[in-house]
Amino acid sequence: MTGSPRMIAAAIAGVLIAAGIAGFAVTWRPAIAAVEPPSPQSFDPVLVKRGRELAAIGNCNDCHTMRGGSSFAGGLPVPTPFGTIYSSNITPDPDTGIGRWPEQAFRRAMRSGVDRDGQHLYPTFPYDHFTNVSDEDDRALYAFLMTRPPVHAPARDNQLSFPLDQRFVVAGWKLLFLRHGGYQPDGGRSAEWNRGAYLVEGLAHCGSCHTPRNGLGAERPDAQFAGGDVDNWHAYAINSQSPSPVPWNADTLFSYLRRGWDSDHGTARGPMAEVVSNLSSVSESDVRAIALYMADVFGAPAPDRIRHGEAVLAQAKMRAKTQAGAPAAQAANGAATQDWTMNATGASIYAAACATCHESNRALPYGGVNLALSTALSGPDPRNAVNIVLSGVRPVPGERSPIMPGFADSMNNEQIVALLQFLRGRFSNQPAWSGVAKTVLDARRMQTVFLQTSPGPSNPPADATQRGGP
Amino acid sequence: MMTLKVNGKDHVVDADPDTPLLYVLRDDLKLNAAKFGCGLGQCGACTVIVDGKAVLSCVTPLLLLDGKQVTTLEGLGTIEAPAPIQRAFMEEQAAQCGYCISGMMMRAQALLQRNSKPTDAQIRAELQPNLCRCGTHMRIMRAVHRASRLMDSADASPVIQRSAP
Ligand code: FES
Ligand code: FES
């Protein structure tokens, strides 16, 4: 027996209402009442200091500050595959910043990606990681930010097309990808390991750059730390797939993250320069914990990787001693798969423009790294090497720091391609890159944008003690 | 053997393709304005202009210069007829020991050719690769602004191009 039309209509209406309520429940978040901006004196200085270190670990200044702009005033354009999103003003300005946010609203933003008004925030703000930050640390971060100088800087409009410009869409994304619950310590591991894991998976949000993303822009859980993209740079795989010629361990990771360079691997640059610059100002034990945890994520290298690393290192040391010239690198890289010896243009450019520093006896960070140790040349993607050849490594103003001149104005695209192909063949045991010419074209275009918008040095200080914190 | 275009003239130079431009300018062509500071691309004393862009001649081998136009300070003006950038640096007394000044002028010239009214911040950013150990930075800043004003009233192109028919 079929129901009367009236009953069917009522059933449909019921379903629609239920769906509406469910949809509403998923997307709707209440506003949290504004407060009078708390005075900076109302915060405990010890808490503020702790917050300063945490903000450095979270690398907050990197996205929330424009080159030449006021700290934390936002406005940085962040290009995503879906459009451009501008970072927000997180100074305590009452009208354009978070001055009227109570701590509870700040914590909700960190944990669930919702602003004080109840609007969903785009996951460019990495709350998929920040959700793991403890209440206590959120309190310290809040205290730090609320005691910064307020800056009047209205938000810029994001450039997103329909339907992504509708913020309720983000609620669906969260349903799929945001895992609440905070960091769950692993009782079988040391306190230091757990500290590192808590920071890496939470505030430090390493996976935001180093984990590849799926079609909806979420990190792929099946490929954690397998290498991702950021600002036209490749963020290397930092798990067992790491392309570094010499395997990393906790000590080399610590020295790299703390000082910005490691003699077996080279110097941090690109977006990572800002990260290590920040890590130079936080407590050493936190950086050690991060290094310890990450060494575990990298895992113990396979015997053939160890052998290759040892061969490359031995050869680099020998060269530093003897200035042996010629193709010592190839001995270590026996399996070089392209005939780089035929690339006369690349070879002469290397000999004339690069070798003076990269084959000098000067130790890092002021000498050039032996390129057989370079992850940029062994990695799967030529972008980082191209970026560095074009822009060089700029020194930090007023500080001792590594430096390399850029060659954008003295080499044309064909010359850069020839150089890159030569370097890849001579200094890595990996197959030739494809599409280097296109990479160079793209990098030239992006270079201009990056230099205009990047807030920080493109290079870390050599001596951490010379730097003030953010 | 290769032909190198410097200050509007063709020079046949007998040097290996991997010879740095700086050595050829100073040793073979006797153009001594560009200085050897570090030879590593770190100080800017050797800056010259190649196809309108400031380039460090100590890390620029000849083989990169095929078909390109090199301009050195000698190509901008003479003692009798200094170019605006040179006049401005003299009038502001921007040189102390003077070692960095040729490089500073060349990089500033490249900037002014691109942007005739740079701001303080733009000048600072542009000249950042060039070091001055005497500390005349403030005078250099003033000299670049003065050159920008002088160029409004003068023809700022290099002499060699001005005298061409
Ligand atoms: S001599 Fe060329 S940069 Fe120092
Ligand atoms: S004037 Fe002496 S180095 Fe600049």
Image (cartoon, rainbow, N blue to C red):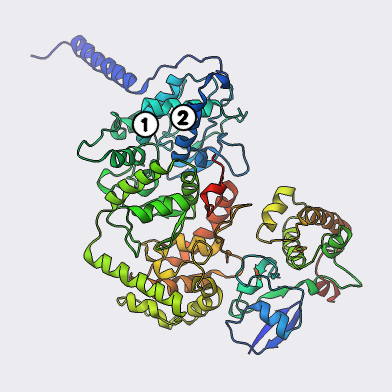
Residue at screen point 40% across, 73% down = A317
Q: Amino acid at mark 1?
A: Val
Give the image location of residue A4, x and y in percent: 16, 10
Q: Nearer the viewer, residue A245 or A78?
A: A245
Q: Secondary structure at mark 2?
A: helix
Say above or below: A329 vs A187.
Answer: below
Q: Residues within 10 Å of mark 1 (few under 14, many from 20)?
A: many
| Residue at far left of view | A1
Q: Is mark 1 within 8 Å of ligand 1?
A: no
Mark 1 and mark 2 in contact? Answer it, CB < 8 Å.
Answer: yes
The image quadrant where one finds ligand 1 is bottom right
Q: Amino acid at mark 2?
A: Leu
Is tag 1's residue or tag 2's residue first in the polypeptide sequence? Answer: 1
Q: Which residue is mark 1?
A: A133
Say above or below: A176 vs B64.
Answer: above
Where, by quadrant of the figure, is residue B154 drawn? bottom right
Residue A141: which disc? Answer: 2
| Residue at far right of view | B80
Direction from residue A242 to residue B97 in the image, left or right? right
Question: Which image quadrant: the C terminus of chain A?
Answer: top right
Residue A434 visible in image = no
Give the chain letter at badge 1.
A
Q: Nearer the viewer, residue A9 or B86?
A: B86
How many angstroms separate mark 1 from mark 2 (CA)? 10 Å
Where, by quadrant of the figure, is residue B82 drawn? bottom right
Residue at screen point 13% across, 12% down = A3
